Amino acid sequence: MKFKQIQAVKARAYEAFAQGKRLDVPEQEAARLDPITLAFVGDAQYALYLRRRLVDTGIPNVQILHLLAAEFVSAKAQAYVYRHLKTDLNDEEKAVCQRARNAYSQAPKSASVGEYHDSTALEALVGYLVMSEQTARLEHILGLVYTLTKEYCALRHGEKV
């Protein structure tokens, strides 16, 4: 999208948001949304979930909470989680993840391209479950995320789970 087009859509988006209305675009079921859009939602839900789990540990220092949260929502940690939970996914979830892995995006310097694609797939999966309002399945997947993140932490820092 060119700069002028982005500015025009942005202006319409501001107006729609301010009025509490939807843009004049067709609605789609959650599985058909752009995978990067799903990852956008999933990233926020994923980070909030892990931040809540960290706060629940009783850590009294916000700086430590932030450092741990940043590590646990990194592309490296998310790729580890995705690679270990993808066998637990149903066909629809696998399709969402595959679309997200194949979506064009720029990998950060802090992770390999493969890690970044896997982390995007995981975020898109979480976003899909949020947007399709599959609460029970979301809770199950986030439970696996928690378990696997603890495992990742143990491997990384030499602790027993």
Image (tube, rainbow, N blue to C red):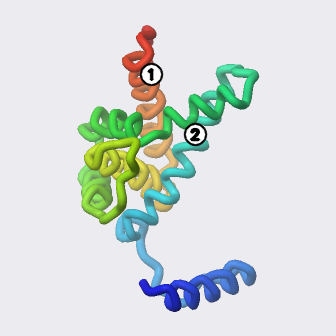
Residue identified by numbered label 2: 49
Give me the C-alpha separation between circle 1 and circle 2.
16 Å
Residue at x 58% of width, y 39% of height:
49
Q: In the visual, does 11 lie left or right of 83?
A: right
Q: Position of residue 36 (x, y in %)?
A: 41, 63
Residue identified by numbered label 1: 153
Q: As drawn, which residue projects farthest toward the front?
A: 109
Q: Amino acid at mark 2?
A: Tyr
Q: In the visual, does 160 lie left or right of 62?
A: left
Residue at x 30% of width, y 64% of height:
103
Check residue 17 in the rendering and tell me which mark sits there, or answer none: none
Camera-near label (1 vs 2) is 1
Residue at x 25% of width, y 56% of height:
98
SS of the residue under disc 1: helix
Mark earlier in primary sequence (1, 2): 2
Q: Does the CB distance between marks 1 and 2 fall below 8 Å?
A: no
Quadrant in the picture for the N terminus = bottom left
- Whether residue 147 is situated above or below residue 81 in the rendered picture: above
Res 161 quadrant in image: top left
Q: Amino acid at mark 1?
A: Cys
Res 100 quadrant in image: bottom left
- Counting other residues with Cα less than 10 Å from the Cα at mark 1, is it few (<14), some (14-19), or many (20 or more)? some
SS of the residue under disc 2: helix
How many numbered discs? 2
Res 145 quadrant in image: top left
- Counting other residues with Cα less than 10 Å from the Cα at mark 2, is it few (<14), some (14-19), or many (20 or more)? some
Q: Position of residue 37 (x, y in %)?
A: 45, 65
Residue at x 68% of width, y 78% of height:
17
